Image: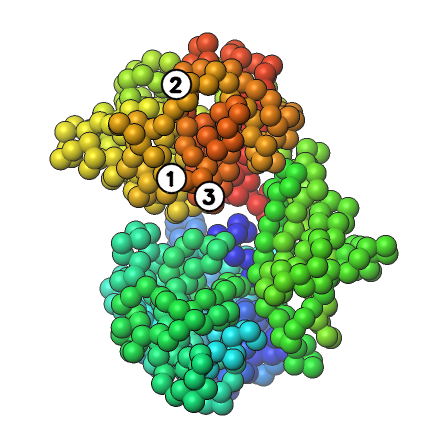
Amino acid sequence: MKKKLNIKGFALLIGCLLLGACSDQTDDSRIPTGSGGKTIISFQVKAAQVESRATVATEKTINQLMILVFEESSTPGTYLYKYPVTATSLGNNTFEASLQATDSKVKTCLIGNVTDISAITAGDSYEEMISLLTVPFPAAGPEYLPMYGEASFNQLASGGNESRTVYMLRALATVDVSVANEATSKFKLKNIQAVRANSLIQVIPDAYTENPAGNKVVSSPSVPAGSTTLTTSAVTNENDATTLAGLYLPESEMIIHESEQTSQATSLIIGGIYIGDDPGNTEVTYYRVDFKTSANDQFGQLLRNHKYMVSIADVSGPGESSVEEAGSKPGKNMGTNIIILDDEDSGEIHGPDGSYLAVETSSIYVNYYEEATQTITVESDPDPYFIQWVDDNHQVVSGKATMTWGGAAVEGTHFSLSIAADGSSITVTALENNLTGTERREKAMITLNTIQLVITIIQKTHVTYDKENIVIFSYCDLNADLGDEIMSIATYPTTMQPLKDFIKNTSLFGPGGKLAFGGFKIAGLYSSASPMTTRLADLFDIILIQEGTAWVNPNNAYPSYEAYSTEMFKNLSEWLRFSPQRILMTVFDNPYMETSLGVNCEFEWGSPKFSNSSQYAIASDIPSFIRKGPFGELTTGTTINAVGTSYYISRTANPHLTPILVINGNTDQMVMSVDLDKRIIYYANTTWFKTSGLLTGNGNVNKAFDILMGNLISWMADTVIGEKLAPDA
């Protein structure tokens, strides 16, 4: 499973489901006659592992289990609805149902805690049933959570007895809120609820995968057509506890456009008392928290059977006076950490002594290059925990120091590991490049009182996947282009031939290359011919923007160059936010980049600042994956003769950028840099990639700039493909 904001999940062992007794109420009027006999099926039901801190029966009970029976039609693979059966509970998580015998293949859909199936009729296909089977979401929350599972049979023999183990998937997300120790003196938690929650629940997801344990996991929401929104009832804190659970919510879509996030996203509203300097204050105010984490840009998205653990880290002032006011404005005065957990791997444990430990994921993936890092969020109660390196048998490795809160990083064999000063996160760093062709793994154990949780750290290899292609889109004016192999809209000259030769050299980038994957495909289009829409951008993995691209008015459809430039960079920003598998590489020749991309080009007289220097230099703090990668190692400070106008952007004005190339003798003047958070590479001009530019040409790797571009493109490819495939690749 890929990590999407996907934040990885956990598996918490459940002792049992609290199962209610049901009677066998087979609706024989819906059973075709003449089929001959019955088959008794025993269903061993296992609930999806994810569970909140709530001990209420709501999320554990299957009060009624309905079996919807589908038979394969004359079209292979197409299953049509036949009849329902209400199963009988035998206890111990087991239900029994009597089904009509048939020689046809049968697919059974198990529906828990749903009684109204009137929307589906005999003859509906299985696919039609998925979208038809919806139930209302009550503002006060359901008494029992809708669940779904399925089991298939090659036939149902008359008089036969069969059994199946079925993993059920809850149709709702759950939200837990806690107040961190350092915030308890400032804030009293009183209630939680949500605004703009969807009014309908789709019982069965449009798509899911199964992890090795057999648990179903979704990576995108299924929101029924016609769903409106509502404000849920508040879950109240009656005992002034520092934790509160029991808020259940339907799935919701990610809100892409920033302008719509405040008004359209499903948001958590936390009610509480800000104590501040007034211990006697009793006024409850309301704070908005949006479902988004630092590792997950899917703003407002909620997924079924996921737990959203919100930890209140700091409160600096009162909230809004009402739930409605809080829901209509951006959040303020409350700092939170959010962990999103699903069933993919064990990341949460409740100890028998009441202690509690949760990590964002127990499988931590880092990139192939030296100094690649990954940080995961941790929640613990009580504090603190400690970490030790362990071997494959989970025995502590001798001679290694114990890692403590705020202590120095401790090196294992392939990684170093450190804990934040407040224990809220763990950071892993790769000690060297992994160019071996196989993953490297190492284990560490977190100990908190009676809890011991083993985490596995995996460093990916630079060899990614030999069947995957990457599509680069060259969006250009009339001065620079990579050509086109895909669009076939018009014939474009390849003016950046050295760069094209470089990326199309299969000994460098291809199944047998230094970076082994399917290779690059090139698409090209003149910016004057078509605007950069999000629909166009969605076709590509990497977009390359050259000089003058935004200084056009495609088909004269915009009132001004400024209007088009603003729209173009807004669309590119949204394209990047939608997926962590995308890269933008652009010149910085347009002042309208700043609003959407966040780069300050400090334009003067219609152009970026420039230097008359004849040399560039490898930046001293160039990213480690460019300094040392599959194509070799660079020495910082190495000079490269300048080509073309040496435009630069200031590091002082853009502290969020990491320099790659700077003007020799002036480390503040960056001619090439990268925004690692947004995955944007900025470069001075396309002359570098033309004949007599900075590349050697003919796809050769002879000079420092060749090595730089080889390592940079390797990182770009790994970002696109590695993220697609990890951790399954």
Do callouts 1 and 2 mark residues in contact (Cβ within 8 Å)?
A: no
Count every numbered label the image shows and give the total.
3
Residue 100 place in picture, x, y as percent: 46, 70
Above or below, comparing residue 367 to residue 221 in the picture: above
Residue 251 place in picture, x, y as percent: 38, 64
Above or below, comparing residue 400 to residue 175 in the picture: above
- Residue 589 vs residue 58, the one in the foreground: 589
- Image quarter where the C terminus lies is top right
Identify the residue at horizontal 71%, vertical 47% (top origin).
Answer: 415
Do callouts 2 and 3 mark residues in contact (Cβ within 8 Å)?
A: no
In the picture of the structure, the residue carrying the numbered disc 2 is: 645
Above or below, comparing residue 712 to residue 17 in the picture: above
In the picture of the structure, the residue carrying the numbered disc 1 is: 599
> Mark on residue 47?
none
- Residue 569 vs residue 135, the one in the foreground: 569
Query: Dot 1 surroundings within 10 Å: few (below 14), some, or many (20 or more)?
Result: many
Identify the residue at horizontal 60%, vertical 22% (top origin).
Answer: 638
In the picture of the structure, the residue carrying the numbered disc 3 is: 656
Q: Which of marks 1 and 2 is nearer the N terminus?
A: 1
Q: Give the image quarter of residue 461.
A: top right
Instruction: Determine the secondary structure under disc 2.
Output: loop
Identify the residue at horizontal 65%, vertical 73% (top origin).
Answer: 383
Query: Dot 2 surroundings within 10 Å: few (below 14), some, or many (20 or more)?
Result: some
Query: Dot 3 surroundings within 10 Å: few (below 14), some, or many (20 or more)?
Result: some
